[in-house]
Amino acid sequence: MEHGIPAAPVNPHPAAAGRTPLGFGAFVTLSRSRYLMYAQARLQDDRAGQAAVAEALHRTHSRWEVVLRSPSPAQEAWSALRCSVTAARRGRDDLGTASGEDLLHRLLPGPIADIVLLRHRLGLSPEAVATLMGTEVSVVEAGALTAKRLLHAYLSDLREVIPRI
């Protein structure tokens, strides 16, 4: 176990058995704490958040060379994290939904909900959110504006149904 990541069950490069691929340790050092913040915020459980992050990093570790060849390695790793967190939510009966999504992620498209969570609940800068998610700052800013517009529309629709809200 290196950098808190369990060894991959199948090593695609037997010659490198037991070694962390080049750059993966640095990636974990830069990303793990923010991954944990995100996972724990969505799961509302520290231990479940740690398990989801460990699973996502394990998946990323096992595909590291493929991830590095992708147009956005950070985006690939972020996708693995979102999948792990969503699966963890889906597997917990006490969260009140079988969809694997919290209210924010049910109301907004996934990437936009992530932007709102990272920016407004966890207090990350647009630059930090863009780096973490593997996207551009302009995408983060546009996502935040879209979220505001969509949430305002939902509230307006609700006011039509229940006028005194």
Image (cartoon, rainbow, N blue to C red):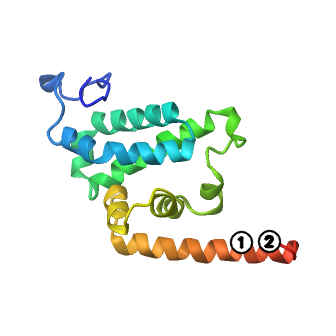
Residue at 81 percent across and 75 percent down: it is 159
Quarter of the picture holding the C terminus? bottom right
Secondary element type, mark 2: helix
Residue 51 in the image: x percent, y percent? 45, 31
Element type at mark 1: helix
x, y (%) of residue 59? 36, 36
Location of the N terminus by quadrant is: top left
Q: Quadrant of residue 150?
A: bottom right
Q: Which residue is mark 1?
A: 154
Query: Height in image: 84 above or below 70?
Result: above
Alpha carbon separation for disc pair 1 and 2? 6 Å
- Count how many numbered circles sit on residues in the image: 2
Amino acid type for the residue under numbered disc 1: Tyr
Horizontal and vertical percent position of residue 14: 17, 23
Callout 2 amino acid: Leu
- For residue 99, which quarter of the picture? top right
- For label 2, the residue is 158
Pointer 2 local density, CA inside 10 Å: few below 14, some 14–19, many at least 20: few
Name the residue nearer the viewer: 75 or 54: 54
Q: Residue at x 41, y 69 (%)?
A: 140
Tell me the residue at 16%/42% (across/down).
23
Q: Are marks 1 and 2 in contact (CB under 8 Å)?
A: yes
**Residue 76 position (above or below residue 126):** above
Classify 72 as above or below 125. above
Q: Is residue 151 left or right of residue 47?
A: right
The one nearer the camera, 144 or 98, is 144
Residue 130 appears left or right of 122: left
Q: Which mark is residue 135?
A: none
Q: Is 106 rendered above or below residue 137?
A: above
Res 108 quadrant in image = bottom right
Q: Percent x, y for residue 2?
A: 23, 27
